[in-house]
Structures are given as C-alpha cells and as structure tokens.
Image (cartoon, grey):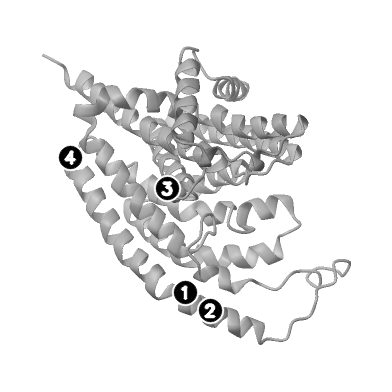
Amino acid sequence: MISSNQSMQKKNGKRLLVLDAVRGLAVIGMFVQHFALNRTNSFVSGNTMILFMLCSGISYTLMGRKMLEKKEMAKQFYTRVLSRSVFIDFIGYAIIMLNGPFAMVLCAYAMLFLISLFLINRSMRTLIWTAALLFIIAPPLMIIGLSLFANTAVLSDIAGGPLSALAWMPVFVTGMIIGRLHLEEMKTAKNMILLGTVILVPFKIFSVLILPNIRMAVENQMIGTFYAEPNPYAAWPGNIEPIPWHLIFIDAPQSGSMFELLIGTGGSLILLGIFILAEKKLAMLYKPFACVGRSALTLYVVQFLIAWGLAMAGIEVTSIDIGSIFMGDIIIAAAVIAAGCLLARLSNAPLEGAIRRFEHLFV
C-alpha cells in the first residue's frame, strides 16, 4: 500500500510534470514566434507569453504556500523572492544592453514577483476579485504609464506600457488562483476548460465583429483633437507623449489590452485543462516538453544571445525567414526540445543553477 504522504508526493509530481510541460510549450512558442513565424502559427504571437505568465503565477503560489505553511520558513520565502527578483532584473538589463530585436520582459517579470508578495497570503476571494479588477483597470493604467513613464527605467518596468508588470498582472494573479486548486483532480481540469471557453468565445467574437468599429471611432476622435507636439527638453510632464487611448481597444499580440489578455487567458486555461486531463495517457510525451519548462530562464535568454551573435556576424535575425521554409517552425520547435533535453542532463540549467546559488547567498 502507498501511504497518504507518498500518494500526495505522487500527485504533486504529476502536477509539476503538467506545469513544466505547459511552460515548456510556452517557451517553444516564443522561439517559433521569434524565429519561424508564419500565417499558420501566427496564433503563438503574444499568447505564448500569456501562457508563460499563467504558469508562473501557478508556480509562485505553489512555492509560496508550501513555504509559508511553516512560520520559520516565511522569512526565507520573502528573502528568496527578493533575491530572485534582483537576479532576474539584472539579467534583464544585461539583455537590454545587447539591443536585440525582440521585446524583453524579464525586468517586468522581476517586478511581478515583488508586487505579488502583497497577495501571496490573501484569501481566495480576495485574489479572485483582484484578478477581475485588474483585467479592467490594468490596461488603461499601463497605457497611461506608457506616456508618463516612457523614459524611466524602474517605473516603466512596473507600469509603463504593454510589457510592464502591471500589464501582465491580471494573468499572473489568475495563475496564483489556479495554484490554490487541486490540479490533480479531473473536475478541476474540466472546470478550467469550461471557464476558458466561457471567456474565450464571447470575447473573441466581440473582438472580431465589434471591437474594430470602436477602435476606429476612438482613433477618429483622437485625430480630430488638437495635438501639441511635446517638447523633449521641457520639464516633466511637459515632455510626455499624448496617451494612446486607442491601444485599449485592440486585440493584437503583446498589446496589453483587456481583450488580448482575456482571449489569451481563456485559451491558456483550455490548454492547461486538456493537458491535465490527458496526463495519464500522455505522460511520456510530456517529458521532453517538461525538460524545456525546467530550463525556461536559460532558454529564454538563449533567444537573445542567438540574435546578438547573428547581429555581430552581420546577420539580422529578422531577415532570416525560417517560417517560410517547409516545416521551418517544426524544425525550430524540435531544436528547442533537443536543447531542453540536453540541459536536463545537468543537475541545473546554467541560469537556473546560478539563480539558486545567488539565493543561497541570502537564505
């Protein structure tokens, strides 16, 4: 017989396999988006980051709840989050120095970890209301921040546009809510698929049939409004750009609009629910994707290093149209999976190992 403790460990192992596999799928989607995007796989653009943020919120809750159950580990958890945020932020700014062609979210990701400390011990009801409110208020606030904080580093990372922490916060908090559920239960998976469908379908229909007309009306109103060119040498706020309100009413990759976030979150919930339901039958197929998921930080950074290396060799990565090659996106995905499997042979992937050693300096 298996003891209850062993049974729980087995369930936790399964849950982590699914989570790592889905996170790995998100990382693969990022590589496809950056190196082999075409009409067939265009749906990965933006949605892979939403999926990654959802998984990150789940992991954040799992890590936090486990450590905060023991009072003597509470201080260790907060120190761990702080040190991890500093490390990720440093890596993010190092990547920015490379001046690559891809949008980089590590700095915003680090800020998300810090901001979410205020929510880790809140009730489930508080988290649900917070997530719902953030889906409504975060998009306009980050659009305002895009104008106010455009030239400020830390404030821009917190609330300065579609790639800021505030822009991803609704999805991250939704992941924190999911992290408190019994993910090993089939009922939970089915409810996630149902909820994802209820979110995805109406908002997708609205974004296709109605949203373009609203956006056009807002744009026409903005065009007809008197525009004064800001003076870049004027004292703040005289040097800020006008607020681009029309960005709230679009459904475009990495726009940070409510419609993009809800549609992407709905699709991510459906995908995660399906992965949980199919785990017993497809567990062996999940393992290569899980290897990618466990090396997510390292592989994420590798994208920028590849682009930087090609630029140093005089080749612009955006000019390499791998997506137009037959099965080019499949080749990229297979290469990422192979890299993940190779990294899995190590005790820790390079950056994952480095972040743990950095944490041990303070914990």
For marks 3 and 1, the one nearer the N-term is 3
Q: How far apart in space, not on screen, are marks 3 and 1 (Cα)?
A: 23 Å
| Residue drawn at 22 percent across, 54 percent down | 194
For marks 4 and 2, the one nearer the N-term is 4
Q: Are marks 2 and 1 in contact (CB under 8 Å)?
A: yes
Type of residue at label 4? Answer: Met
Residue 72 visible in the current orientation: no
- Please state, as top left, top right, bottom left or bottom right, where the N terminus lies in the image: top left
- Please state, as top left, top right, bottom left or bottom right, where the C terminus lies in the image: top right
Q: Percent x, y for residue 103?
A: 62, 46
Q: How far apart in space, not on screen, are marks 2 and 3 (Cα)?
A: 27 Å
Task: Kindly identify which numbered label has been placed on residue 40.
Answer: 3
For marks 2 and 3, the one nearer the N-term is 3
Q: How far apart in space, not on screen, are marks 4 and 3 (Cα)?
A: 31 Å
Q: Which residue is mark 4?
A: 186
Q: Quadrant of residue 244?
A: bottom right
Type of residue at label 3? Answer: Thr
For marks 4 and 1, the one nearer the N-term is 4
Type of residue at label 2? Answer: Met
Q: How far apart in space, not on screen, are marks 4 and 1 (Cα)?
A: 38 Å
